[in-house]
Image: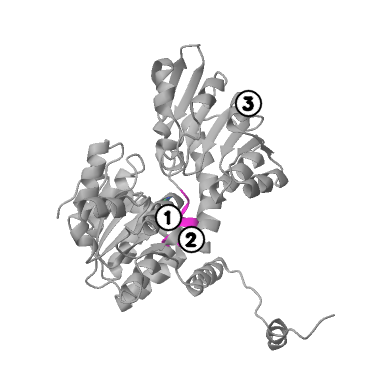
Amino acid sequence: MDFDIKDKSLAEAGAHRISWAARDMPVLRKIAEDFAREKPLKGIRMSACLHVTTETANLMKALKAGGADVYLCASNPLSTQDDVAASLVVNDGIPVFAIKGEDNDTYYRHIRAVLDIKPHVTMDDGADLVSTLHSHYPEWVKEMIGGTEETTTGVIRLKSMAQKGVLGFPVVAVNDSQTKHLFDNRYGTGQSTLDGIMRATNRLFAGSTVVVAGYGWCGRGIARRAQGMGARVIVTEIDPIKALEAVMDGYSVAPMKEAAKLGDFFITVTGNINVVGAEAFDAMKDGAIVCNSGHFNVELNLPYLESISKERSILRDFVEEFVTRDGRRIMVLGEGRLINLASAEGHPAQVMDMSFANQALGAKYLVQNRKTLEKTVVRLPEAVDQDIAALKLAALGVKIETLTEEQKDYLASWEMGT
Ligand code: ADE
């Protein structure tokens, strides 16, 4: 079996951590049990490009239980947990191509390694597999069943491909499921981003000013948690509705060039480029800490920061200091890559349980509906979303109401008023 990981001897430690995560993934466990019985992915070759974490390992095991022949590479050079990669190879016989800290060439070599199996189905977090397939293996695209996509940034890329008429197969936008973005993006990114900053810096949030760029579900989650820890939060936004929501949620809202003068911490979660740009770096205070929790590191204009700096040095793991020519010290965390996975462990298993339930059921949905799905970005049916939420509630021991016949009639009627 071909693979490329850091060190096979880490497998035992990885296996323990994978089991720990599995305890908090009851929905995925149920799906894995169903998959083991029904084998909905029998004979399907799958290439997966995901953050190689304990939660991802449980997803890989579920897909394998469903009959898939699955190959895994990293969806970010800094997010791999090397012990997890080792355990998947050694204990589960799943080929993994991922090493924490790999350079760009190795990252793309690993992507090509998992695509070399000529997949029927891809599973992406950021759309690198789909984009590499369309650019380098156009002949294979026509024969594929489809793909699934985990994250907002990837879905934006894919929708743009669909709009330009170049997307060659259907892709399930997992991020568009409510049981994904309402929980993973908000509570997962919210907690794990602060966790990443705290592990990297050991700094106190209380009494500090935190600038959150972007008030989507990730930004909402981060802002709420930073406020809860005693920080003053300033939100930057381009969307008037989201900006208004941030105001009414109790935050200051300001353009980045104003916020830049005040922030102690800067966190980007927009999915866009140069959100902390030249103007912001020029205005920042001495000692500012800057990081990104969006999918790609382009949210920070690091080449500009480098160009105005006279020195740079690593102060601690994941903390690099740039000293500007005018003498200010600006700290960049995790090379501007998603800080929650670079210096922490990503989202906790409780939310990845639902995200990866959507991934697993998304793969099954593609295979079952291969004859009818259009070559565009699709959502999982609402009923699947509802089922995942119901399973999660059951696992949490939470019971909810059901409609009475009288209530159903009432909702269906239009004649009844006061
Ligand atoms: N994305 C964010 N957190 C993650 C995790 N724990 N596993 C896989 N992908 C993630």
Residue 263 in view here = no
Query: Residue 284: x percent and y percent?
Result: 56, 22
Position of residue 270 in the picture relative to residue 206 (left or right): left
In the rendered image, the quadrant that contains the C terminus is bottom right
* Front: mark 3 or 1: 1
Secondary structure under badge 2?
helix
Which residue has dot 3 on it? Answer: 262
Q: Is residue 157 magenta?
A: no
Residue drawn where x is 60% and y is 46% of the image: 239
Amino acid at dot 2: Asp
Query: Residue 59: x percent and y percent?
Result: 36, 60
Secondary structure under badge 3?
helix
Residue drawn where x is 72% and y is 43% of the image: 250
Q: Nearer the viewer, residue 261 or 101?
A: 261
Which residue has dot 1 on it? Answer: 155
Mark 1 vs 2: CB contact within 8 A: yes
The residues bearing labels 1 and 2 have C-alpha atoms spaced at a distance of 8 Å
Secondary structure under badge 1?
helix
Which residue has dot 2 on it? Answer: 176
Binning the other alpha carbons within 10 Å of mark 1 as few (below 14), some (14 to 19) or many (20 upward) gives many
Q: Earlier in the sequence, mark 3 or mark 1?
A: 1
